[in-house]
Image (cartoon, grey):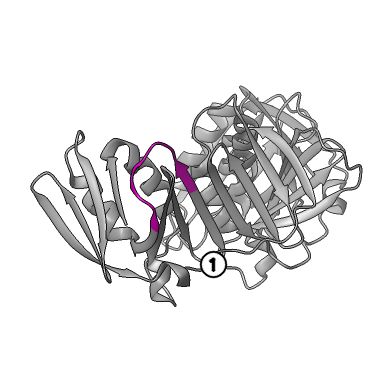
Amino acid sequence: MNIKIERSKLLPTLSLVSSVVERRQTLPILANLFFHLDSGRLTLVGTDLEVEISETLDSVDGEDGSFTVSSRKLLDISKMLPESSTINLKTDGEKAIMSSGRSRYTLKTLPSEEYPRIESGNWEERFKIKQLSLKNLLSKTAFAMAIQDVRYYLNGVLFEIGQNRLRAIATDGHRLAQSEEEIEISSNEIRQVIVPRKAITEISRFLDGDEESEITIEVSKNHLRLTRGDTTLITKLIDGKFPEFKGVLETELNVVIQADRSELIETLTRAAVLTTDRFKGVKLKLDQGKMSVTANNPEQEEALEEMEIDYKGDSVETGYNVTYLIDACRAITTDQVALHFQGNDGICIVRQPGDEISTWLVMPMRI
């Protein structure tokens, strides 16, 4: 087979589908992309067996057929070619010849019939959501996912689907983030699925910036699929039970303050300078009319930051991970931020004024 296509048309698709391909593979063919040309429609596929991304391009000249070729090498070569160049790809036995102008590369191929595809089964739920809505939902929650936790069900985002809403919850056991967006869906029952960390990262890349356009999301027993025009992302779901979290969100919080969001982030960031990579703890103390933030490190250094707040209650003092507090404040889009405290050595819940749904919870730590 052979393909003739403009670099400017091929490169964005190459970049998208290559993003899912891992550099280290258990199977050699997983380092490759799958190419299939049929009646002028070129489909490219990349996968790591957990997440699969495919995109189809129209009006591509060439001879029908399929092959697989190295994702990294093809992408690197394409990036270095002149912007206005045309790329020719032609298979010759177990080789693929890539040429453009005076450039010519011979690359190894592997049999296309051996390329693994994710078999998803029947789709049981289907709904649409604006790209901007999904982008906002993930930006408010995904940062709280665990990273390579032995509790594998924490290495992802929980989607609760039903009752005309899509709710996202993420936690690493020390903090939690929750938000939701309205959707139209026929089911009144709440369905829970855990989308793995890598898929969440790829979904963020999958959103193409056309914020008002909609994407279709479908759910089966073990998979989730997103479709945007001729572009599709399929991911396996995490088979596990997400920890019960609603009880802690209903904890009675007696101390509530509001602060300027930017000033609070700057105050926390300055205090964080004297924390260490291994210990990010700071002590927050509320007193009449002010909040102080104190940080210490093993070198006996200390940072003290103070800011004025509207508070007239009893003194409250608790330690928190400063990075978690900063992340929660950055997820808020309003000028003001509300901090709800349980009391001395208790949890802190960060909220956005006017938003009763979005919640960011930070567990206390001993300092």
Task: Let me know if residue 323 appears in the view.
Answer: no
- Toward the viewer: 194 or 226? 226
Please provide percent x and percent y for residue 207. 53, 38
Please provide percent x and percent y for residue 272. 48, 47
Identify which residue is drawn at 60% across, 54% down.
Answer: 234
Which element type, helix, strand or loop, lies under badge 1? loop
Query: Which quadrant of the view contains residue 163?
Result: top right
- Toward the viewer: 296 or 138? 138
Q: Which residue is mark 1?
A: 49
Query: Which quadrant of the view contains residue 284?
Result: top right
Identify which residue is drawn at 61% across, 57% down.
Answer: 235
Residue furthest to the left in view is: 102
- Toward the viewer: 84 or 333? 84
Q: Is residue 316 left or right of residue 303?
A: right
Query: Number of labelled discs?
Result: 1
Work out whether 185 lies above or below 123.
above
Please provide percent x and percent y for residue 107. 23, 65
Q: Quadrant of the N terminus?
A: bottom left
Residue 295 highlighted magenta (yes or no) = no
The amino acid sitting under disc 1 is: Leu
Q: Is residue 246 left or right of residue 84?
A: right
Residue furthest to the right in view is: 188
Q: Quadrant of the C terminus?
A: bottom right
Q: Residues within 10 Å of mark 1 (few under 14, many from 20)?
A: some
Range shown magenta: 55-65
Task: Let me know if residue 194 appears in the view.
Answer: yes
- Toward the viewer: 300 or 36? 36
Q: Is residue 271 left or right of residue 264?
A: left
Residue 62 highlighted magenta (yes or no) = yes
What secondary structure do most residues of the magenta stretch adopt? strand
Please provide percent x and percent y for residue 273. 43, 47
